[in-house]
Image: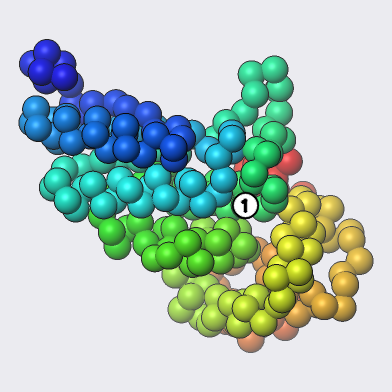
Amino acid sequence: MAQLARLAIRPLRIAFDDIKLKDVYCNAVRTAFRHKIKEISNYILFNYMDKPEDLYERLRINIELNEELGIQIFSFPMRFSPIDRTDRNHIGVHWKYRKYLRAVSAILHVTKGVVAAGTSFFEAAFGKTQEEYFEILAMPREMIIHRYYYRDNGTTARWRELYQSLTEEQKDRLMQMVSHTVGELRSMPCPDEFKEILPFYLLKYSGEEALAEVVGKQLSLLEDGDTFDDES
């Protein structure tokens, strides 16, 4: 590291692909800091052999290192896709729901692919706790991308109220259902248990409608031709 520190490395690039390497990774960052390297780009593989909570913990570790050392670690989550596939349909063995992967994609869409240094930035995007993180992963995509709009008009609070009223078994069934594409979802019969919450997953941002008008229109259902990135 002493020799690397003599070079014009700004930032230092390092990977953190497995939560089991936490101690090795943290030691590497602290070693870089001791050699006066204070800007680091960190590539974080997910959707491989990891779990959804592992992604959150690795990002959280970087935030804590930033605060502890007074450095800047910029995290770049990188979604794994096998090289022998030409689509993006791979779901890691522990990720279970395609909905979770789409939610991470939506978060990164907002953050331009980077998780910057700063606790408030991280907690706004990924949650203050793992419980909040999983709730964000379950949140409708439009409500993630247009977070403040739907928070301020009360839509997010209404969705959260309905979501938190579900049992764990119902949440599991809901996540399986909303892992379908929007087009598939619109053509599927809606179970009685999800009649109130499902329209939130068919919502389309307009930036103009008041909450009452949106709800009255079943949250402005997407047209057949409307698609999202990663909706396959």
| Residue 189 on image: x %, y % | 91, 66
Q: Is residue 69 left or right of residue 160?
A: left
Residue drawn 31% across the image and 34% down it: 25
Residue 142 visible in the shown view: no
Q: Which residue is mark 1?
A: 100
Residue drawn 89% across the image and 61% down it: 188
Residue 154, relative to residue 102: is it above or below?
Answer: below
| Residue 151 on image: x %, y % | 48, 75
Residue 82 visible in the shown view: yes
Where is residue 80, by image quadrant? top right
Residue drawn 32% across the image and 58% down it: 121
Look at the numbered disc 1 and give the secondary structure of its residue: helix
In this figure, what is the number of numbered marks?
Answer: 1
Residue 78, relative to residue 186: is it above or below?
Answer: above
Residue drawn 21% across the image and 48% down it: 66
Where is residue 214, by image quadrant? bottom right
Q: Is residue 128 left or right of residue 132?
A: left
Where is residue 155, by image quadrant? bottom right
**Where the C terminus falls, by quadrant?**
top right
Q: Is residue 50 left or right of residue 61?
A: right
Instruction: Look at the image and name its color scheme.
Output: rainbow
**Where the N terminus falls, by quadrant?**
top left
Q: Tell me the kind of residue under disc 1.
A: Tyr
Give whichever of 117, 154 is nearer the camera.
117
| Residue 114 on image: x %, y % | 38, 42
| Residue 40 on image: x %, y % | 24, 33
Residue 88, relative to residue 7: is it above or below?
Answer: below
Give whichever of 173, 25 is nearer the camera.
25
Q: Is residue 96 left or right of residue 72?
A: right
Is the residue marked by circle 1 packed among few (<14), some (14-19), or many (20+) residues within 10 Å?
Answer: many
